[in-house]
Image: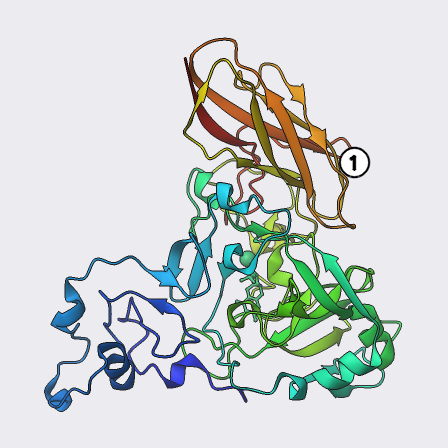
Amino acid sequence: MKDVRGIHEVYRGDPETADRLVWGRESHPVTRRGFLRGAGLATMTTALGASIPFAEFMPGGLIPAAYAQAEEPFSIAGKDGLLILNDRPINAETPAHLLDDAITPAKRLFVRNNGIPPVTDDIDPLEWVLDVEGESCERPKSMTLAEIQDRFKHQTLQLHIECGGNGRSEFYPPAKGNQWTTGAIACPEWTGVRLRDILEDCGIADDAVYVAYEAVDTHLSGDPTKQPISRGVPVWKALESESMIVWAMNGEPLPPLHGYPLRMLCAGWPASVSGKWLRRLLVRDRVHDGAKMAGQSYRVPCKAVAPGSTVADEDMCIIESMPVKSLITYPKSGMQHSLADSLAVRGHAWAGDRQVRRLYTSIDFGATWQRAKLQRPANRLAWQHWSSDIGFPGQGYYEVWARAIDDRGVSQPMLLPGWNPRGYLNNACHRIAVMVGA
Ligand SMILES: Nc1nc2c(c(=O)[nH]1)N[C@H]1C(S)=C(S)[C@@H](COP(=O)(O)O)O[C@H]1N2
Ligand SMILES: [Mo]
């Protein structure tokens, strides 16, 4: 199954001591000239643009002096303005004001990797093979992407994906993991086929419970017998019309970091159910037990707990639909504004499997709220755009808060939702600072 060359073959350092890695190929786009510790010789010579005649005497882990003092920040090829939270694996989020587009472009799509992405840019995508199997699959099959494109009806939908840990940085006591602020959310347009069509073609037995993915990224340890992540959804969610297998995003092939050439996409749930570099679908007769399904991963306490509590695994429940949430994407926090004019504020709102019914803004720390204009989604499970003209009563420091309410009447909390050990599901109101002057 690990038939795709992974980064670990380029990289020969010890993963325990190597805190930074420079990728030697164009398709491994994280670079920081200051860090080569743990990089293999091939990687180093590529980055230096020269061979190292005395390489055999070079102490392992030595950062070449040519780079040791460089101060350039990390950058990811194909991305614009993302903040890098971690480079091994790569995780990067998008500042709120850069999520202003109605349809998120690839350059503004957050990156969340649990392992090392495969090198897939030199493959023939049409020959990519998807296996469909599992205890509750009646007719296990292998199909190429060409066959999938040929045999099943295509659809294009705008669908939101949000990391389950988005907003984690606000929780106290803090939770380990990527300290996402607000930027692990996006809503691109995806093209592919319905997951349901593929599953029905392979036969779903009556005892089917879950549909899971397996992918070809590599575990951080480099151990080929371990998968970094393999999650899934209950059959009912997999059979929804919006659940898809996609090969294109915004009319282009999937970018390498986002699952090229094939990805599962089940919007409205933690994006960890949307497997990138999709190689296998499993129709399971039980709740899937792949990597990051059990224990405390992507789970929250079934019943609310006091902040800082230790919660036994059996009292943790798998996260399903994400909660109602919104973002202010214009203006950028900290902007100066003149008292004479009203301020046109705008953003997006979404609510997991549900629709957003109302959006309100407040300029008095939540004491009073003003209803915003809220658009319908482009399709089910797409985010909704909102806008509001806001006037200020005098000069000074203000915060604009946005609060969405879903179609069951559930509201975002103003400051923080219930604490949970891993810091998931923070759907607190987004707030920005505005300085109103003369
Ligand atoms: N194969 C694979 N699929 C994966 C992941 C991964 O590490 N490997 N990460 C998941 C998680 S936790 C998230 S939040 C989304 C992130 O998708 P993106 O990087 O395209 O934004 O991909 C999901 N699918
Ligand atoms: Mo995630």
Q: Residue at x 68, y 45 (%)?
A: 383
Q: Residue at x 71, y 29 (%)?
A: 373
Q: Residue at x 74, y 80 (%)?
A: 134
In screen coordinates, is 9 left or right of 319? Answer: left
| Above/below status of 54 relative to 108 | below
Residue 90 coordinates in the image, percent (x, y): 42, 64
**Disc 1 Cβ-to-ligand 1 distance below 8 Å:** no
The residue nearer to you, when weighing 138 against 123, is 123
The residue nearer to you, when weighing 258 against 156, is 156
| Above/below status of 132 relative to 387 | below
| Mark 1 crowd level (few <14, some 14–19, many ≥20, 10 Å Cα) | some
Q: Which residue is mark 1?
A: 407
Residue 234 coordinates in the image, percent (x, y): 76, 62
The amino acid sitting under disc 1 is Asp
Residue 167 coordinates in the image, percent (x, y): 50, 43
In screen coordinates, is 389 left or right of 266? Answer: left
| Above/below status of 430 relative to 169 | above
Residue 16 coordinates in the image, percent (x, y): 30, 71
For the N terminus, the quadrant is: bottom right
For the C terminus, the quadrant is: top left
| Above/below status of 174 relative to 254 | above
Residue extending farthest right: 206
- Secondary structure under the numbered disc 1 in the rendered image: loop
Quarter, ligand 2: bottom right
Q: Is residue 437 visible to the viewer in this orientation of the structure?
A: yes
Q: Residue at x 22, y 78 (%)?
A: 48
Q: Is residue 177 visible to the viewer in this orientation of the structure?
A: no
In screen coordinates, is 437 left or right of 322? Answer: left
